[in-house]
Image (cartoon, helix red, strand yellow):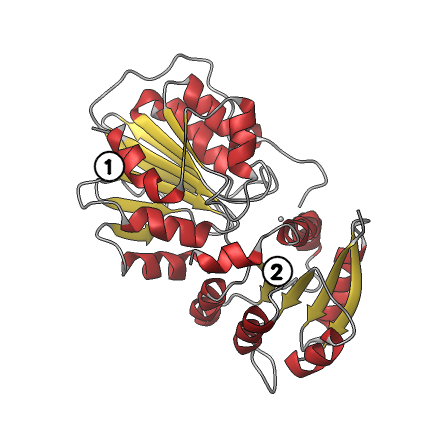
Amino acid sequence: MGKIKVLIVDDSASVRQTLSKILSSDPQIEIVGTAYDPFNAAEKLESITPDVITLDVEMPRMDGITFLKKIMTQSPVPVVICSSLAERGAETTLKAIEYGAVEIIEKPKIGTKSFFEESKIMICDIVKAASHVNVQKLTSIRKSFSKKLSADAIMPKSKTGAMIKTTEKILVVGASTGGTEALRVFLEALPLDSPGIVIVQHMPENFTKAFANRINSLCKITVKEASDNDTILPGQALIAPGNKHMLLKRSGARYYVDVKTGPLVSRHRPSVDVLFRSAARYAGQNAVGVIMTGMGDDGAKGMLEMKEAGAFTIAQDEQSCVVFGMPNEAIKLGGVKKILPLNQIAHGALRECY
């Protein structure tokens, strides 16, 4: 198999140079060109055929969103948005996902050594994941240490038995590539009296709030970006903030979330494995776990722990996934009780709650 060919489009020379250096460090990736704006990129595309394009949002002459729409209309290629995700740009970047962008990475903050240590592998992983995405399917349904850490880095595995069964249920959901649209379909199908929901969707900082607000405007239930110590309530979904882990906790009869920093787990922060492990410990058979479309294996081990603790576990099927990575890994580990297409997951999860 040949190398993954990448075209970098960004008006900043320093960003082009930094991204080129980061991506070229991976033996599976080859930089076939860089461009300072969409017009320059269009010229390059006449002679090269990249497997992935990294694209800035704010550029002169033509913005990245307009160029993205042109790419997806004329000759679809997996596009990774590379943007400074300040709060003012979050809505614009969210629009990029709707138009077909595969993933989002934050621009490297030049001079921040710790950022590069954490981001190098994560950025390469995102680009490699993007090269496997079926862009046609993506549009139709609409982070790092060299060592890959497990959920042990945030919470040790429980040595006690499963929690006693109660009448209150919790829905625990994990997703990555393609997950923004999958979550929309799932959450729009939930009624006002649905159980409380906690969600990890791999997203950068400053993006999850805009995403939660958008989904909230479409759903019967309330959807919000989680804050530390938020109570998990029926008819409400809490989405983990970008760049923070989120754990499910319980104090007496009250379920709540613990939002915290920590190392990347399964090369992600937030990590699905961290959320699922906490659900196994504090909810046990009172939880229903759902793992959706996404590249890699984050959530697979945590889902197995949930199943072993008595939770009912559901994986999205291959046909409806943009990338059948995370669900497939959970299935192969034996952590999944039921495999369902996207449009049946909400009904299937609710059936196990009542």
Is residue 29 visible in the rendered structure shown here? yes
Residue at (44% x, 43% y) in the render:
200
Comparing 35 with 162, the one in front is 35
Give the mark nearest the N terminus, 2 or 1. 2
Amino acid type at image mark 2: Pro
Which residue in the structure is indicated by mark 1?
A: 195
Q: Dot 1 lies on which element?
A: loop
Q: Is residue 114 left or right of residue 303?
A: right
Distance in Å between CA atoms under marks 2 and 1: 36 Å
| Foreground of the two, 16 or 229 | 16
Give the residue type at disc 1. Pro
Residue bearing the label numbered 2: 78
Image-based side of 60 in relation to 19, left or right = left
Other-residue count near label 1 (Cα within 10 Å), few / some / many at <14 / 14–19 / ≥20: many
Residue 294 in the figure: left or right of residue 52: left
> x and y percent of residue 190 in the render?
25, 45
Residue located farthest toward the left when viewing the structure as drawn: 193
Coordinates of residue 148 in the picture (x, y in percent): 66, 36
Foreground: disc 2 or disc 1: 2
**Residue 246 vs residue 62, the one in the foreground:** 62
- The residue sitting at 46% across, 18% down in the picture is 158
In which image quadrant can residue 352 be found?
top left
Q: Is residue 204 visible?
A: no
Q: Residue at x 55, y 68 (%)?
A: 72
Quadrant position of residue 343? top left
User: Where's residue 231, x and y in %?
Assistant: 27, 40
- Residue 108 sits above or below residue 62 on the image: above
User: In this picture, is 306 found above or below 54?
Assistant: above
